Amino acid sequence: SQQGEEDPQALSIQEGENATMNCSYKTSINNLQWYRQNSGRGLVHLILIRSNEREKHSGRLRVTLDTSKKSSSLLITASRAADTASYFCATDKGNQFYFGTGTSLTVIP
Amino acid sequence: DAGVIQSPRHEVTEMGQEVTLRCKPISGHDYLFWYRQTMMRGLELLIYFNNNVPIDDSGMPEDRFSAKMPNASFSTLKIQPSEPRDSAVYFCASRKTGQSAGYTFGSGTRLTVV
């Protein structure tokens, strides 16, 4: 399976702190994406990083990719209460994406 | 664009009844995916279509599940007969070939089979 595994399963931080989530996967990939899911809602695409990229930024988000270790990390800087959600990594080969089990992030105001 | 539209948002049905979930993808998107999400199994890909043709249905759990895409703007996922273990949130997602923005997900249908 190419399914990613996020770590930790749950994370609780104070508002203003940084949050780091990790994703490990099993086989070679073309792209890796991160999604956010608010409670009771669908997933929202956050950022895509290609296999030949090592780091990518989007606003307060920073994603790294280490293909030699088959791992990625998502850093959310200066967290806000509104960042409270579950975060999933998704790996692809071809046209299908395989989602991990997610990290549940709680940002305490 | 209104995004990916799923209906109904919530469905409660009795065991043995037929359930039909509906999805309208984003106009111009040529891929459509059906996912199921549960606490125990996470997000599972059930089936996906390309240009209305089913490409991979290996994730469909049983013959009780079927999916169709009669045209580019509509897809259905049917469960007949439904069972309590089918209770989950079912998501539809679409994307466009070559697009680097990933999938666009609908808001999901929460199915409860009693």
Image: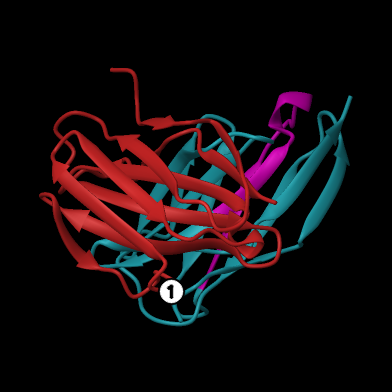
Which lettered chain is shown in cyan?
A
The shade of chain B is red
Tell me the quarter of the image containing the N terminus of chain B: top left
Estimate the x, y position of residue B101 in percent, counting from the top left: 32, 40
Estimate the x, y position of residue B91 in percent, counting from the top left: 46, 45
User: Based on the displayed image, in which of its 4 quarters is residue B16 positioned?
Assistant: bottom right
| Amino acid type at image mark 1 | Glu
Work out whether residue A98 can be spotted. no
Q: Is residue A84 on the magenta stretch? A: yes
Estimate the x, y position of residue A83 in percent, counting from the top left: 70, 32
Work out whether residue A103 can be spotted. yes
- Please state the chain letter of the residue tagged with numbered disc 1 in the rendered image: B
User: Based on the displayed image, in which of its 4 quarters is residue B40 positioned?
Assistant: bottom right
Estimate the x, y position of residue A68 in percent, counting from the top left: 46, 80
Give the residue at mark 1.
Answer: B62
Task: Say how the picture is coloured.
Answer: by chain
> Which is nearer the eye, B9 or B48?
B9
> Which is nearer the eye, A83 or B93?
B93
In the image: residue A105, left or right of residue A76 = right
In the image: residue A12, left or right of residue B36 = right
Q: Which residues are magenta?
A: A71-88
In the image: residue A8, left or right of residue A31 = right
Q: Is residue A18 on the magenta stretch? A: no
Q: Residue at x 63, y 67 (%)?
A: B41
User: Based on the displayed image, in which of its 4 quarters is residue B42 positioned?
Assistant: bottom right
Q: Residue at x 13, y 50 (%)?
A: B52
Asked if A107 appears above or below A105 in the picture, the reply is: above
> Which is nearer the eye, B26 or B61?
B61
